[in-house]
Image: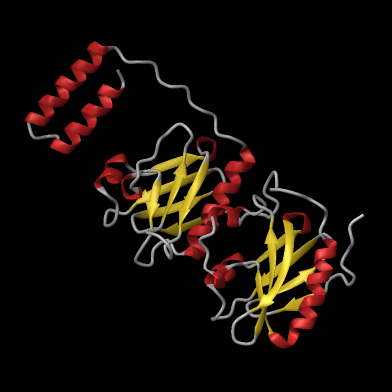
Amino acid sequence: MPHTMSRMGDVLAGFHAAWEFESDSVLIRYERGIRTPKLFQSLGERRIPLRALSGVTLTPGKRGTVVLRAELRPGADPLMEAAAGQLKEGCDPYRLVLPAERETLAEYYADELRASLPAQDGPAERFLVPAPEVPLSFKAYDGKASFDGKTVFFRWFWTGASSAKWKAGDQSFAVSQLSGVEWRSPEVFEGHLRLLRSDVASPAQADQDPAAVVFGLGYGPVHESLPFAAAVLAAVRERGPAAVVPAAPRRDPADIAERIRHLGELHQAGLVTDEEFSMKKAELLAEL
């Protein structure tokens, strides 16, 4: 029989957030102040079931503070799964920073929380922390991304999208088509959000992939693109593995040869560039 928090509804307030302790969860409310990280402001509040936690730590912080941190089980929170370790320490939504003089009180709550955690091992079998609510949208450098809970839409900006994306046209992806999400923080890498599909191999460059939007120059900031990625990931996991589309049957070699001949005529007439001719010819040959 798991221990329960001795004083239900107690609140421990720190910088940028307050934790409210309940019998089966911790409710984290984030401040909306000007100094509060934008990611916290966009999250608003999050309810963390105790069964999503693997532990809690209390450590010295910077400049006369202590840090209470809830440690999550792998696979329990879509936000942290999408972040994949890329969040800066100050944007970690599970860190509560307190003045050092409150260390004794923080230690008390850390002990109470540890005693309340159910005995469990290993990763969570499904997401236990709710994903950010839809609809969600944000502006990337090369397009606008939006998600209504069932479909992801990419609408390209002519000022930023590559010619490959512009030729492919605006994109829509049903959750049922997806196997996952790849988020690369604009603060750590050359950021992007790529939708993963089990039956399609993505090219290396996100700016050439119609299933990806790229960040940069203030576009795709963490507080907008990460909650978006988490919501899509949660919808994909909730639906289950994407169905693998069977490989298309091999094409008739005579048909392929005719299409390559026609492509060559377009190339000679200057209607197709050298690069486009080579790429399309390779695609056609791959169908043999």
Nearer-the-camera pick, 60 or 145:
60
Q: Quadrant of the C terminus?
A: top left
Residue 111 x, y percent position in the rendering: 82, 70
Nearer-the-camera pick, 104 or 168:
104
Image quarter of residue 185: bottom left
Q: Is residue 25 left or right of residue 196?
A: right
Residue 276 x, y percent position in the rendering: 19, 36
Q: Quadrant of the N terminus?
A: bottom right
Scheme of colours in the image: secondary structure
Residue in the image at 70% along x and 65% along y: 70
Q: Is residue 8 left or right of residue 56?
A: right
Residue in the image at 42% along x and 34% along y: 200
Residue 113 x, y percent position in the rendering: 81, 66
Any part of residue 165 in sight? yes
Nearer-the-camera pick, 122 or 20:
122
Residue in the image at 53% along x and 40% along y: 175
